[in-house]
């Protein structure tokens, strides 16, 4: 009888361990059941800088890429040696077969949660560094996604001389997919203009990063935040202190618009107005909003993503029971 008693206890223990393991796993790592989308990846600039292709032929192929640029200006740019040099260095940084695979997986995850999502046609191009700081945009009317490759030439690239370094942190090839994901996430949900407290703003940013978690379940977290790994580690190590600062200074439910510039806007660091500012990671309010949303899903793991996105910030905050503690 003892043997069977121990066998039952052992089975219960194994079941409990399995349950714990399941609960602690990544909610967003799922098996994709749908057929993967067919991603079309086109390098516009390859054609643009090819002198053997007549300008009229290029314009006919890409009529929406002309804007108000004159033929004379186009011809001058096509023959500009320095501009061609920038393009060649930028495109050499891009592993196009891998980028296509990564985009395919990203779009498949998006389609899993948003069945109406249509895979956009993707175009690489060189802006001659003019759009390097904001290199990804979606043209929703025709469902066209543009990626300026000069925005991903690598941190401290000589061509970025004179550009603030805090922009360069996320200007590496590995930042392409997270920035594409973020661009699409911003098309899927919009902030509620009737709710403008600090909590509303950081929870909205947390929702965007929750979409990043769902769309890119295996991507490093620091890339989703446009951080360096060191910046993310600082945020993690100081999570409790950051939240205590917000609480103790009555910022959580404040409607002071200056908090956005201090804790949400792009910059070299966050502005606590203390001696720690220069050491801090930027946009730290976004990090806090993300952790609140993650805590919510630990409490309410079975919540559907679409339902979560419709929830107001106060409900998410209340249900999350967010009380961060510094790791030992």
Image (cartoon, rainbow, N blue to C red):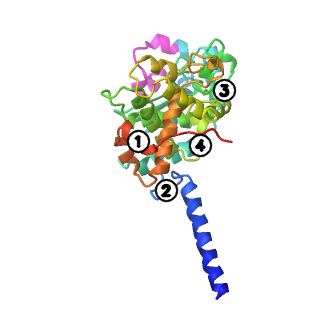
Cα separation between marks 2 and 3:
32 Å
Answer above or below: position of 312 versus 155.
below
Residue 57 screen position, x and y as percent: 45, 26
What residue is rendered at 37% in x and 41% in y? 315
Point out the frontmost of discs 4 and 2: 4
Residue 274 screen position, x and y as percent: 60, 17
| Secondary structure of the residue carrying numbered label 2 | loop
Magenta extent: 55-75
Q: Mark 2–mark 3 contact, CB under 8 Å?
A: no
Is the residue marked by circle 3 packed among few (<14), some (14-19), or many (20+) residues within 10 Å? many
Point out the frontmost of discs 4 and 3: 4
Q: Mark 2–mark 1 contact, CB under 8 Å?
A: no
| Secondary structure of the residue carrying numbered label 3 | loop
| Secondary structure of the residue carrying numbered label 4 | loop
What residue is rendered at 45% in x and 24% in y? 250
Cα separation between marks 1 and 3:
41 Å
Kindly identify which residue carries mark 3.
154
Mark identifier at residue 318: 1
**Residue 31 seen from this side:** yes
Cα separation between marks 1 and 4:
28 Å
Quarter of the figure with residue 83 = top right
Image quadrant holding the C terminus, namely top right
Identify which residue, 138 or 227, lies in the foreground: 227
Within the magenta stretch, is there residue 58?
yes
């Amino acid at each position: 009888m003892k043997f069977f008693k121990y066998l039952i206890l052992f089975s219960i223990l194994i079941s409990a361990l399995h349950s714990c393991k399941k609960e602690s796993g990544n909610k967003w790592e799922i098996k994709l059941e749908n057929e993967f989308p067919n991603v079309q990846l086109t390098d516009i600039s390859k054609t643009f800088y090819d002198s053997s292709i007549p300008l009229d032929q290029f314009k006919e192929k890409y009529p929406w890429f002309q804007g108000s640029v004159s033929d004379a200006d186009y011809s001058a740019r096509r023959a500009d040696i320095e501009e061609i040099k920038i393009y060649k260095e930028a495109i050499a940084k891009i592993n196009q077969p891998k980028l296509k695979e990564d985009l395919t997986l990203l779009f498949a995850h998006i389609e899993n949660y948003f069945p109406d999502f249509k895979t956009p046609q993707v175009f690489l191009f060189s802006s001659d560094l003019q759009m390097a700081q904001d290199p990804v945009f979606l043209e929703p009317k025709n469902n066209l996604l543009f990626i300026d490759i000069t925005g991903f030439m690598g941190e401290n690239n000589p061509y970025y001389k004179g550009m603030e370094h805090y922009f360069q942190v996320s200007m590496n090839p590995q930042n392409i997919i997270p920035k594409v994901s973020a661009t699409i996430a911003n098309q899927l949900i919009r902030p509620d203009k009737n709710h403008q407290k600090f909590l509303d703003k950081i929870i909205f940013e947390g929702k965007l990063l929750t979409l990043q978690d769902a769309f890119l379940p295996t991507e490093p977290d620091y890339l989703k935040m446009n951080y360096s790994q060191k910046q993310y580690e600082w945020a993690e190590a100081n999570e409790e202190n950051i939240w205590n600062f917000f609480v103790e200074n009555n910022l959580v439910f404040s409607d002071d618009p200056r908090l956005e510039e201090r804790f949400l806007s792009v910059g070299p660091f966050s502005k606590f107005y203390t001696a720690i500012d220069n050491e801090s990671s930027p946009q730290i309010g976004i990090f806090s909003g993300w952790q609140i949303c993650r805590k919510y899903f630990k409490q309410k793991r079975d919540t559907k993503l679409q339902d979560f996105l419709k929830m107001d910030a106060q409900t998410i905050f209340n249900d999350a029971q967010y009380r961060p503690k510094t790791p030992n």
